[in-house]
Amino acid sequence: MGADPDRVLIFDTTLRDGEQSPGCTMTLPEKLRVARALADLGVDVIEAGFPAASRGDFEAVNAVAAQVGGATICGLARCNFEDIEQCARALQPAARRRIHLFLATSAIHRQYKLNMAQEEILRLATASISRARELCDDVEFSPEDASRTELEFLAQVVETAVAAGATTVNIPDTVGYTVPDEFAELFRYLRKNVRGIERVRLSVHCHDDLGMAVANSLTAVVAGARQVECTVNGIGERAGNCSLEEVVMALKTRAAFFNVATGINTSRLYPTSRLVSSITGMPIPRNKAVVGENAFAHESGIHQHGMLKHHSTYEIMNPEEVGLARSHLVLGKHSGRHAFRQRVQALGFELDEAELSRVFEDFKALADRKKELFDGDIEALVLRDAGSASGPWTLEELVTEARNADAQASVRLRHRDGRVLTQDARGDGPVDAAFKAIEAATGIAVVLSKFEVHAVSEGEDAQGEARVYAEHNARTYRGASVSTNIVESGTRAFLEVINRIELARGGARQRDERAAPAAAAAAAV
Ligand code: KIV
Ligand code: ZN
């Protein structure tokens, strides 16, 4: 490595761009939990949401700003005064805050989306950045669809943003269209042709439509970007965003090549990845780089032989380095709280005493039903708490009876308002019957798009994790639950879908209330 490595900031947008992926909507407590995990991970900036989008988003950004320390808290805003002022209000409690403005600049977006000429874009960018700077010292500007914007015009936009007072200029590959050589050239062009560019931090924001988000982000770093925008597990719009764990481990593993450093505590990568997967319901592919189940597994004889001689033969990273502390230690019903706590900590989870007590109780109950508990079981117990939307309905009783495919289910549900409903239904198997009973009881009908079950650990009595995805009013909702009884885990997962619909209905009502004043103020600039 040459001189002292430059610092590359990690800007996490799991709570904003990540949450925009279908079915990934998070509740406020879930967002807070993810934000705390991101702060522990050591990210520099947390983009907590888009305050003008809905009251729910405003409250989430506001709550993260008030309750999560250690990172700069950022909110997204369109280039209009109402958005900007709302964003500043939401961020107000944060010790360090940033307003992130975006405005599309490519010819396609100018013509079809904005119907604006180049000069109007430049004027709007100047007015918006100036207003944001009056409210916040730290202002980021993103020319949306930058990678498909004419180079000369992009340089003009960036120069305008710098002159207006932006402190970070982010270059998004909004539709995942660019390729590494071209993108590096774009960064070099801007650094050469934009007056004052040395006064701002250059940032990169890539989407993965052609599978190059990480490669494009890394090439931008080589070409001078000193902030990378990314999400945990690469979740995000369409094919997703640049994956945080991949870009961070590439910069770390190939430090001699990149000669830059991040502030990420890489041993938190694996638990953070599991937490986000559990909360968003987005499974991690087994072969996912860095955090996939197979990322450190060696199956072939030649590889195993090499590994036994020396791990460096086939491993370029250490599993411990990314927080993968797997062991074959088995816990059971005689294991005490101390051993349980140690295992939870070794798996990378930080629980306070109340959380530990709750999960330990679940552990004891499970240990009565299941002889041996493996890491997968413990992880599922801890994450079950994190991933389930605490909506209005709880399942008090489930009874099923099946003769071949013909089945009957009876459910007893309790609503937070005190109502208790009992409902029977017949179905094609006990799971189908239970789903129908819940639909009939709650009056919420959905179209089931996916129902899957997989074992979270080993053994014949392994727990089954059920995941349910369903459509309601053109939106995808999800639910997940774990139990040794898969009819029960499926039913609980289905009830979580219903709870998320109820929660979203509450959010939509709030959005409608806000729509009128927001629309009137949108013309303010
Ligand atoms: O992809 C994109 O262009 C964005 C901007 C808001 C930065 O997410
Ligand atoms: Zn994006």
Image (spheres, helix red, strand yellow):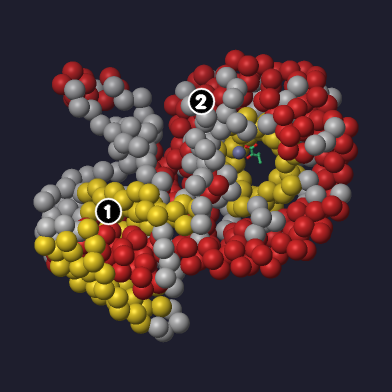
Q: Nearer the viewer, residue 385 or 316?
A: 385
Residue at the spot 45% in from the left edge and 40% down from the top edge: 233
Q: Is residue 372 visible?
A: no
Question: Disc 2 to disc 1, how far (Cα)?
Answer: 31 Å
Element under label 1?
A: strand
Q: Nearer the viewer, residue 443 or 363?
A: 443
The percent position of residue 403, horizontal first and vertical second, equals 11, 62
The percent position of residue 242, horizontal first and vertical second, equals 52, 34
* 326 sits left or right of 41 in the view: left
Residue at the spot 40% in from the left edge and 72% down from the top edge: 442
- Tag 2 residue: 210
Q: Amino acid at mark 2?
A: Leu
Vertical comparison of 56 with 310: above or below: below
Vertical comparison of 513 with 412: above or below: above
Residue at the spot 75% in from the left edge and 20% down from the top edge: 151
* 471 sits left or right of 300 in the view: right
Vertical comparison of 57 with 9: above or below: below
- Decide which of tag 2 and tag 1 comes sooner along the chain: 2
- Tag 1 residue: 465
Q: Is residue 18 visible?
A: yes
The percent position of residue 329, horizontal first and vertical second, equals 18, 49
Q: Amino acid at mark 1?
A: Glu
